[in-house]
Image: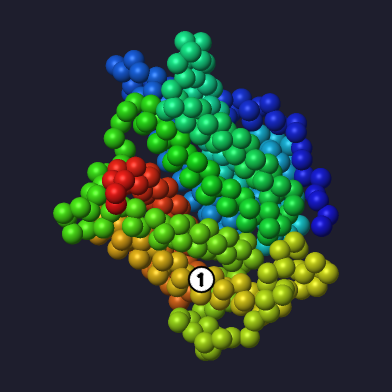
């Protein structure tokens, strides 16, 4: 692989200043809404909730950026042809578009790509603020020699989120400079989903600091005719495992543009087992559309990528459907409902991508469903831990 020399650091300082302005605006809005509450923990919890929401939106906008072929709308990083915005890069964008009218660079694509970067910088700044403010609270307790378990939990989650967002930023840069190398783009998507999960954990940590009840009450099953919450731990672990595998497969389908390799359901290309080339399809370290030997990827490779993702979807639906049923029987009605709704959304949007020719709204909603599953499983983990803690020793 030949790495691009697409790093142009000239606009770094102005872009950091822009991130500061955008991030401070969000922080001030949260602080003003909490003006009558002197608790810094409350403000941190609210700021984390906003950051979690913006991270979810950022994942969806990143999907839109990729699906609209805007990932190379500005082929350098962090700016656009060395400028903070496409306005300054108008001459370069016009020249590139004139040279390749159907290519990756155009005025609209440049703006889509840069808006995605502005949003990513804002989320990164907010996570930095959460990290700093959490450690300020922690240092106060350390000085008073009373570092509580809930504070250690908050410090650990804030630190992990901060370290992860820096790694995610690196993958974002490599996504551009590697010219949409499929393995890099896939890892960037999985990194975004991981960050979403970490922010969910961080929000839970701030709720713990406040002593807030953040999990639904969990019946122990004794005398209620329902199994205890611990009875669905195995289905949760299995569901989490298959979801991780499916997220990776979905990222691989999207980054290789293999969605339309099968345009019928439930069969693919009028066969239950179409002709597939798994060796090429799952050769991980190769350029987009090519093998590592620089040969064009055959269509059977795209079929293998698509059909593997589809077959795994059946397994995910079965495992998470069983998990939802187990949670319902354990009294976790709200969690079960959210999980079931996210599964239905994934089923409908997955079908629409196949039979309707990959509509943009269906593809973005499919990513939204996947991200919702990540949030629901993160949330349900807290309820599961609480259920195990409440389980009687003789159970």
Name the outermost residue toward the bottom: 270
Residue 349 makes an appearance in the image: no
Which residue is nearer to you in this view: 275 or 329? 329
Q: Tag count in the figure?
A: 1
Image location (x, y in percent) of residue 219: 23, 49
Report whether 388 appears left or right of 6: left
Residue visible at 48% across and 81% down in the picture: 264
Q: Residues within 10 Å of mark 1 (few under 14, many from 20)?
A: some
Q: Name the residue under label 1.
A: 312
Q: In this view, does 134 lie above or below 192?
A: above
Which residue is painted at 26% across and 58% down in the image? Answer: 227
282 to the left or right of 233: right
Q: Which residue lies at the image location 64% right of the left edge and 30% below the top edge?
A: 15
The image shows residue 9 at horizontal and vertical percentages of: 75, 33
* Residue 371 in the figure: left or right of residue 391: right
**Height in image: 166 above or below 246?**
above
Q: Judge by depth and name the residue closer to the eye, 55 or 101.
A: 55
From the top left corner, tell me how far across and down residue 181 is, in percent.
71, 57
Residue at 22% over, 53% down: 221
């Amino acid at each position: 692989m030949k790495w691009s020399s697409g790093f142009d650091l000239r606009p770094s300082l102005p872009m950091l200043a822009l991130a500061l302005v955008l991030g401070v605006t969000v922080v001030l809005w949260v602080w003003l809404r909490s003006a009558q509450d002197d608790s810094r923990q409350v403000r941190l919890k609210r700021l984390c909730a906003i950051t979690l929401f913006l991270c979810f939106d950022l994942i969806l906008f990143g999907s839109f950026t990729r699906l609209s072929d805007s990932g190379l709308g500005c082929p350098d990083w962090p700016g656009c042809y060395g400028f903070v915005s496409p306005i300054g890069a108008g001459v370069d964008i016009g020249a590139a578009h004139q040279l390749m009218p159907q290519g990756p660079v155009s005025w609209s694509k440049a703006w889509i790509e840069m808006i995605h970067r502005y949003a990513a910088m804002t989320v990164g700044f907010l996570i930095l603020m959460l990290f700093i403010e959490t450690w300020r609270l922690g240092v106060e307790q350390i000085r008073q020699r009373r570092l509580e378990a809930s504070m250690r939990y908050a410090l650990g989650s804030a630190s992990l989120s901060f370290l992860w967002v820096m790694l995610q930023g690196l993958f974002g840069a490599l996504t551009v400079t590697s010219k949409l190398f499929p393995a890099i783009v896939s890892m960037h998507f999985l990194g975004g989903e991981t960050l979403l999960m970490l922010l969910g954990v961080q929000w839970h940590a701030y709720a713990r600091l406040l002593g807030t009840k953040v999990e639904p009450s969990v019946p122990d099953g004794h005398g209620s005719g329902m199994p205890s919450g611990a009875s669905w731990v195995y289905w949760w672990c299995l569901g989490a495992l298959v979801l991780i595998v499916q997220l990776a497969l979905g990222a691989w389908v999207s980054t290789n543009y293999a969605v339309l390799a099968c345009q019928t359901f439930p069969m693919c290309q009028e066969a239950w087992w179409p002709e597939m080339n798994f060796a090429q399809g799952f050769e991980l370290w190769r350029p987009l559309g090519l093998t590592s030997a620089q040969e064009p990827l055959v269509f059977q490779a795209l079929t293998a990528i698509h059909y593997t993702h589809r077959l795994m979807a059946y397994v995910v639906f079965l495992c998470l459907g069983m998990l939802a049923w187990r949670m319902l029987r354990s009294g976790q009605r709200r969690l079960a409902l959210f999980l079931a709704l996210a599964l239905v959304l994934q089923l409908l949007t997955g079908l629409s991508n196949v039979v309707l020719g990959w509509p943009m709204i269906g593809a973005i909603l499919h990513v939204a469903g996947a991200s919702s599953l990540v949030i629901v499983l993160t949330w349900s983990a807290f309820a599961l831990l609480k259920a195990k803690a409440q389980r009687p020793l003789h159970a």
